[in-house]
Image (cartoon, helix red, strand yellow):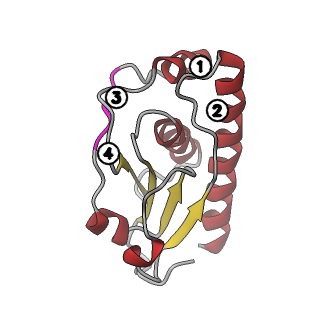
Amino acid sequence: MSSNTEADDPIRIAFMCVQNAGRSQMSTAFAERERECRDLKDRVEILTGGTHPADHVHNEVVDVMDEAGFDLSDRTPREITLDELRSCDYVATMGCSTLDVGDVGEDVDVQDWALEDPDGQDLDQVREIRDEIEQRVISLFDEFSIAE
């Protein structure tokens, strides 16, 4: 657990990749659901972004997330800054990051999830990536919920 938060400060998590159009968007949706289910609305802040954001969330990602009950059609990829990342307790990169972890600082728990890019994949492949992301997000929430 990172030491840069006081007891009353929310836990900040960032999900980032290059385009912020697939894996990080799926991660963010699952994290929002976990935050809600665990009644951590006031305790957890969720950021997402990319180093070179795309124009829109990948269509195949929107489709498979819709199957799981999430509407990502109105989400817009955004750029994430180093300052935002430095303010986080946890940063999950998706395996495509151009991020130099040393730039973020030692207080941030950076986890590289090394996930396959869903862009252009067939829907079954994207579903597998989605399901793996869901499990990783649940595990991350378990990790810091225990640490509190």
User: Which residue corresponds to mark 2?
Assistant: 130
In the image, which is nearer the foreground, mark 4 or mark 2? 4
Is there CB contact under 8 Å for labels 1 and 2?
A: yes
* Quadrant placement of the N terminus: bottom right
In the image, which is nearer the foreground, mark 4 or mark 1? 4
How far apart are the alpha carbons under marks 4 and 2?
A: 22 Å
Q: Nearer the viewer, residue 54 or 72?
A: 54
Is there CB contact under 8 Å for labels 3 and 2?
A: no
* Relative image position of residue 114 (x, y in whole percent): 64, 52
User: Which residue corresponds to mark 3?
Assistant: 75
* Relative image position of residue 110 (x, y in whole percent): 53, 68
Q: Does residue 79 lie above or below 14 as drawn?
A: above
Q: Does residue 58 lie above or below 141 as drawn?
A: above
Magenta residues, start to end: 74-78
N-terminal of the two: label 4 or label 1?
A: 4
User: Which residue corresponds to mark 4?
Assistant: 52
* Relative image position of residue 6 (x, y in whole percent): 40, 81
